[in-house]
Amino acid sequence: MAKSGFVIRVGGIFVGIAAAVCAGGSDVEKLREMMVKHQIEARGVRDPKVLHAMRTVERHKFVPSHQVSSAYEDHPLPIGHGQTISQPYIVALMTELCELNGTEKVLEIGTGSGYQAAILSLLAKEVYSIELIEALATQAAKRLKDLGYRNVTVKCADGYLGWPEKAPFDVIMLTAAPVSIPQTLVDQLKDDGGILVAPVGDFFQELVRVRKINGRVYRETITHVRFVPMVPGSSSRN
Ligand code: SAH
């Protein structure tokens, strides 16, 4: 048996992650292909555009250097400051729930590494992303710029306030969990057909999708999840 952290069992196949990531090029593409096939498609994500985005974005460029060998494994990873980049399947599932067709203005709360923003940027027209921790916001903004994701704008702020100057949004995605859905964010959602996707709860969290139709809000629960909490910033504590 190989050392832990070096290999992962994906649908019965052992993959030398570290070797492939170090080798680069088509080997990393193969890892992404296996990630999509065994972790994402196998669990029911079907939208071809989402699968294509998951195959395209170089996840290993969004994780800390000591985590690169684990970038394509089937779990979240630490990105510093007590935060995590979500499991690939959860990123794909939440993206599919947004029903993007390429014309949308999207708000993400919780930029973290910038990975989810990069995925969204391939499927929407514009992405605005808010991160509370300044070091993560600065790093993600630089990373996204360096990697050529031109339609993503990151700012360091309290996501509970949303981004009123850019509202209304077609889609709002939260990647940190509030205890309940902030009304400010619902207010910044388009009245006709806006979609908000969020983990909601404290210890026990549900992944929720909210649709706003003619100003009325319809909520559905998708599955159970575990995200880092959406921390009230100083502005929302006042
Ligand atoms: N989407 C990220 C992962 C997010 S982890 C990725 O793809 O890597 C959740 C992020 O939400 C953390 O970076 C955390 O700092 C941020 N966060 C928590 N509370 C917040 C708030 N009130 N406003 C904005 N960001 C917040």
Image (tube, rainbow, N blue to C red):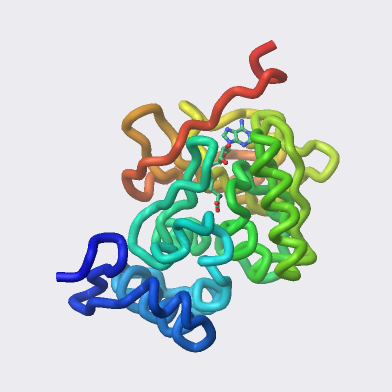
Q: Outermost residue, right direction?
A: 165
Can residue 213 be seen? no
- Taking the image as shown, residue 77 lies to the left or right of residue 81, namely left
Residue 235 placed where, x, y %?
72, 19
Q: Residue at x 47, y 56 (%)?
A: 66
Q: Is residue 66 above or below residue 221?
A: below
Q: Residue at x 47, y 82 (%)?
A: 23
Q: Residue at x 56, y 71 (%)?
A: 58
Q: Outermost residue, left direction?
A: 1
Residue 174 placed where, x, y %?
56, 43
Q: Residue at x 36, y 41 (%)?
A: 226
Q: Is residue 47 above or below residue 200?
A: below
Q: Quick one: 171 or 131, which is closer to the camera?
A: 131
Q: Specify the quarter for ligand 1.
A: top right
Which image quarter holds the N terminus?
bottom left
Q: Outermost residue, top direction?
A: 238
Residue 33 placed where, x, y %?
42, 81
Q: Is residue 209 above or below residue 188?
A: below
Can residue 226 be seen? yes
Q: Quick one: 229 or 173, which is closer to the camera?
A: 229
